Amino acid sequence: MNLTLAVRALALLGAPWIAFSVLTQGALSTQTVLADGGTWARGVWQYLCYFTVLTNIFVVLVLARAAWKPSDRRGLNAPPVELMAVTSIVFVGAVYNILLASLWDPQGLRKYNDDVLHIGAPILFVMFWLLRPRGELSWRDGLFAALWPFGYAIYGLTRGAVDGFYPYFFMNPAEMSWPSILVNMTGLVSAFLVAALLLVGLDRTAFKLQPKI
């Protein structure tokens, strides 16, 4: 199997697999809001405030386009965009399993979806990214990739200021002071940038080590 076929196979597997968990977890989350007296609109709105959810949707879109046009390196499959996606989904897995996993104990379908979105999706997408052509990234693409968590920090804090719901304790002013929140957000974005630059370095090193024909 050549690399293009392998990329398409992973994309064809990953896009619907991850999308199923995104959608069913959204339905479960919305049911919880309904049980508390909220509305469907409120449930969907609240579900779409999580970095995990938005990043997994992003990954599904990248994989879906790659399944359709695996050799086309434009749009959602442009190298800087795929770098943003792979860094984001790896970050989702790392932050969740280090900081958040111990805070709840999901069961049944929630547990399955939790594992897919925080473990399965990062592993599959890293495999997908490693099969892509190497040597197409520049160091400034690391800065581009970091726009995703930076934009999310603004989005999440702005939403919270409007409706009072903050998805994560480390960005909730009811639990932390604003200086602490800013330190947290700066630290996370900085860690993300470092991770993106490490992946750029890996890309450039792998390209240099490829046998030249």
Image: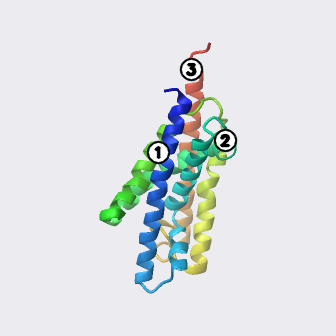
Q: Position of residue 18 (x, y in %)?
A: 47, 53
Numbered circle sitting on residue 79: none
Q: Which residue is mark 2?
A: 78
Q: How is the image coloured?
A: rainbow
Numbered circle sitting on residue 210: 3
Give the label, 3 or 1, closer to the camera: 1
Q: Position of residue 73 (x, y in %)?
A: 67, 38
Q: Residue at x 60, y 30 (%)?
A: 133
Could you give the CA–CA distance between mark 3 and mark 1, rounded to whole angstroms?
28 Å
210 in relation to 96, above or below? above
The local crowd at label 1, few if under 14, some if 14 to 19, many if 20 or more residues have their Cα within 10 Å, is some
| Disc 3 to disc 1: CB gap under 8 Å | no
79 in relation to 25, above or below? above
Q: Secondary structure at mark 3?
A: loop
Q: Residue at x 47, y 66 (%)?
A: 170
Give the image quarter of residue 70.
top right
